[in-house]
Amino acid sequence: MTKIGTATKQGARDQKMREGRLPLAAEFLVGVWLVVAAFVFSYSVTLAGSAGFWNVLLCGAVVTVVAAVRLVAPRAAAWLGLVNVVVGFWLIVSPFALGYPVEGHRDAAKTNALVAGILVAIFSVTAVTVAARRKAAARRRA
């Protein structure tokens, strides 16, 4: 009986780790895409110019680094998730703040920033919420 109980506890722990790491892995992938997208899209033809390029590149780098740190040390760096929440919301607002035009092929840069911002915001809010709930549950158990 002990083996079954131990295996069940281990299985539950593994599932919790997967649930907590899935949004972080998705954040990491979106961050990598943002870094790549800075070179894929031609920001020079947008009104944002080089500001759009640097905005996407730096936001992608921040999202990637924060997600990587949280993947390695999810409990120690739980508060870092709030950084990605802010970056996600900035990515949603940045096309309007930096003046990305809507027409033509330049719309791809705007759409990229909006979609990436929405994804980063959703994944980071999910990861922060999961971490907060786990911390509260651990406090209740102790």
Image: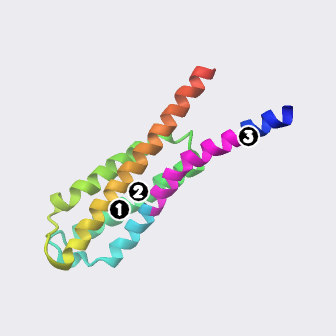
Evaluate if marks 2 and 1 touch, with contact meaning CB atoms under 8 Å apart.
Answer: yes
- Residue depth check, mark 1 versus mark 3: number of the one nearer the observer: 3
Q: Quickly name the residue at label 2.
A: 62
Q: Residue at x 48, y 53 (%)?
A: 67
- Give the percent coordinates (x, y) of residue 38: 33, 72
Q: Magenta residues?
A: 11-29
Q: Quadrant of residue 141?
A: top right
User: What numbered label is drawn on residue 67?
Assistant: none
Q: Measured along the vertical axis of the image, is residue 4 above or below residue 137?
A: below
How many labels were placed on the picture? 3
Q: Residues within 10 Å of mark 3 (few under 14, many from 20)?
A: few
Q: Residues within 10 Å of mark 2 (few under 14, many from 20)?
A: some
Q: CA distance from mark 2 to mark 3?
A: 33 Å
Q: Quickly name the residue at label 1.
A: 58
* Mark 2 / mark 3, whichever is N-terminal: 3
Q: Quickly name the residue at label 3.
A: 10
* Front residue of this view, candidates 140 and 85: 140
Name the amino acid, label 1: Leu
